[in-house]
Image (cartoon, coloured by chain):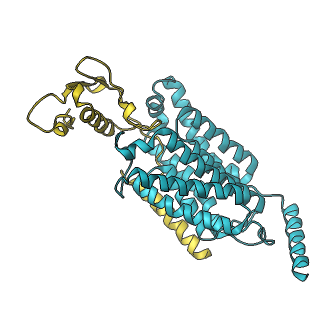
Amino acid sequence: MHHIDRFDARAVTWFLRLFGLALLIDVVTELAAGVWHVHTGRFYPWRHLGIVPLYPAGVLVVEWALRAGAGLALLAGARRAKVVAAAVRVAALVLFVAVLERYSNHGALLFLVAFFLTLGPPDVGAADFDGREHPALGLVRAQLVIVYVFSAINKVAHGFGSGRSLVHLLGGAISPGQATALSLLVIATELAIPVVLVRRPRAGIALVVAMHAAFALLVPGVISFGVAMTALAVLFAHRPRSSASASASASASAGKARSSF
Amino acid sequence: MRSFCRALLVLNVLYCLLAALQEGVPGWHMFESVDDLDHELRDRDGNVVDVRAWLPRGANLVDRSELRKVVGFVCEREHERAPFTYVEPSRGTNVTLGAPGSATVHDRCMIHASH
């Protein structure tokens, strides 16, 4: 069985890039949605919780710039340890403030991932990366299971399966019968994804992409969340044991050869 | 590091359990309970006012109390178009908002919970 805290360097590289992309899309989504006007006072002060007072639009610009900068750094420099370490620290700090100011599920997810990464920023260029344990990345991977399982539990507990919530959410665009079937399918898929990801990672990733693509088509503003969940799903990918070991020993040999010069 | 991460994982799961059991605690609640938000706001000339025009695009209104707060905000912002008529057909609510009076604009635009 693939060890719980062992990761494939290539998968982690793609996870970091996708996470960077999710950070960028989140900023672009807020810009396009007009969150700016919430901070200037033109719009209703739309936010949840609001532990920190609604800050001025000027501060929002700084927040957006830092979040987008961290996202770009991860996209472009996922294989450079120092870039990754700096980007996740900046992202964690800024996202923490942002979540306190206007709570959202996807904001909380992005913050948690960035925070977990600060505990052990991955150095995917390290020769022994595949052979070492990465408990911080283990936390990130576990977050996917937590999100889907608790989302399904909450849906069951609140009667989402009846289809009423979907009918209301989609403004009557689907019939009650279709909504019930779709609601039950969403719950079943959320519960199935962690199992499929562990047993057949590629199929699991495809399932995550398909489900979030469907959400993105039906509900506006959820693309960043979908990309972040896809990033987490990619962490489950691993090469077959034999090729991973061969690659790790080849990298280790190359490292020894380099250090002997 | 490994023990610390395991402890964080346990805390994370315990928090999610609490959020699942306790109403109002933020957790992984995603559209599981969306109210039927049928409503209509009209200004004094009878023109329909789109409440969502005062929200960021894609903002998902999922409960009625939030909708009513947004309506109150619109009434205050556009008070030159008052009085407004606010209707919630499924609840039989039909109220006039922002009508001239001695109270503040904020109070005149508030939809009381009893409605």
Chain for colour cyan: A
Q: Point out residue A90 in the picture as x, y percentages from the top left corner.
A: 55, 64
Q: Nearer the viewer, residue B39 or A38?
A: A38
Q: Quick check: A104 above or below A44?
A: below
Q: Nearer the viewer, residue B115 or A41?
A: A41
Q: Point out residue A9 in the picture as x, y percentages from the top left corner.
A: 76, 62
- Furthest residue in direction front, as rendered: A58
User: Which quarter of the rendered picture does the N terminus of chain A lie within?
Assistant: bottom right
Q: Point out residue A46 in the picture as x, y percentages from the top left corner.
A: 38, 43
- Furthest residue in direction bottom, as rendered: A260
Chain B, which colour?
yellow
Identify the residue at horizontal 58%, vertical 53% (top origin).
A68
- When asked about the image quadrant of residue B4, the answer is bottom right
Residue A224 in sight:
yes
How many callouts does the rendering have?
A: 0
Identify the residue at horizontal 50%, vertical 22% (top origin).
A175
Q: Quick check: B89 above or below A261?
A: above
Left or right side of A62 for A83 = right
Left or right side of A42 for A154 = right
Q: Nearer the viewer, residue A140 or A192?
A: A140
- Furthest residue in direction left, as rendered: B102
Left or right side of B11 for A239 = right
Residue B26 in sight:
no
- When asked about the image quadrant of residue A8, the answer is bottom right
Left or right side of A205 for A43 = left
Identify the residue at horizontal 64%, vertical 54% (top origin).
A72
Q: Point out residue A128 in the picture as x, y percentages from the top left corner.
A: 79, 72
User: Which quarter of the rendered picture does the C terminus of chain A lie within?
Assistant: bottom right
Identify the residue at horizontal 63%, vertical 68% (top origin).
A85
